Image (cartoon, grey):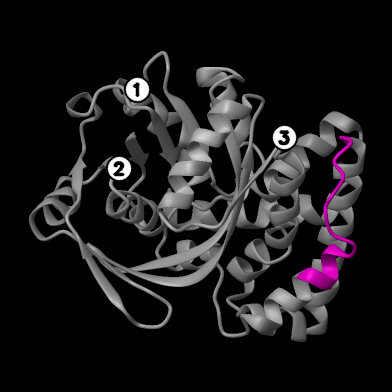
Amino acid sequence: MNIAVIGAGALGCLFGGRLTEAGHDVHLLHYRQSYVDRLNEEGLTIESEDGETTDIAVEATTDASEVGPVDFAIVFVKSHQTEAALAEHAACIGPETDLLSLQNGLRHYDRLLDVVGEDRAFAGVTYQGAVAEEPGYVRVTSSGPSTFGGTNDAGARRIESALEEAGFPVEVVEDPRAYIWAKQLMSLPIKPLAALTHLSNGELVATPETRGLMEQIVAEAETVAESRGIDIPMDDPMEEVVTTCEESHSHYSSMLQDVRAERKTEIDDVNGAIVDIADEEGIDVPVNELATNLVRALEKSYLD
């Protein structure tokens, strides 16, 4: 298949590299020319969880017009960058191109639907994890499954086949929204509180003050999900949050990493999305609203 990866960060390079290795014609799209030059000249190295490295020759560009329409494009930019990235790289999205997003946030599926319609939009979640140690070197931190779906089963199966050929465990579902919400229920209590307190995952659940706030954030989000008819596929979301935090005790949330690097965070697509949906449903979510406003204020202190 002819594939474009919009957003060649850690996960974009991981998926793009593995798909290239599986024999697909893959184009990595990134906004920075120096980064693209490094990938084209020296290739990509992927380090597996057991420390084995694989060197892969890849094709990268900043200009989607050099690529042209592809069979499918997978989106891996930050959630708040999605609309701009799709507009910037519209040249690779043709009338038959399928779009897949495995991004964070609650609204990425809707953004793809707005661009290509329900027959060609697919979304879900991935529990693959990776960090870019330096340009062109990606270290895998988790090899978890990916779950996605859409209304066009034939299109979903084509994408599934390509991902499985690349070695990714994949599940196709009819409606991915419940899985998107389930993953975000794990992120909602962690991301903003980590950004505000600079605590690691394990410290967040071990500290009574933050643990109590996390429980309230999750409870509010469950109420909002129920109002939208979302059947969360887990019995006790807060218990899952605690288990995740304890198992990744020393990990620092990506939102905290964004704050430390003085970058814009994904708060608007995480807790901010809960606040927006709750407002539409006439539901009060005071803790999610407070967390959202505090992170926005923190961003303002270094972005303005």
Location of mark 3 (residue): 174
**Mark 2 surroundings within 10 Å by alpha-carbon count, few (fewer than 14), some (14 through 19), many (20 or more):** some
Q: Is residue 227 above or below residue 52?
A: above
Main SS of the magenta part reads loop
Label at residue 90: 1
- Nearest the viewer among 73 and 152 is 152
Label at residue 230: none
Residue 263, position as x, y percentages in the image: 42, 55
Residues under labels 1 and 2: Cα distance?
21 Å
The answer to whether residue 231 is left or right of residue 159 is right
Q: For residue 174: magenta?
A: no
Residue 283, located in which quarter of the rendered image? top right
Location of mark 2 (residue): 24
Q: Is residue 17 above or below residue 46?
A: above
- Nearest the viewer among 85 and 69 is 69
Upstream in the sequence, badge 2 or badge 3? 2
Residue 247, position as x, y percentages in the image: 66, 82
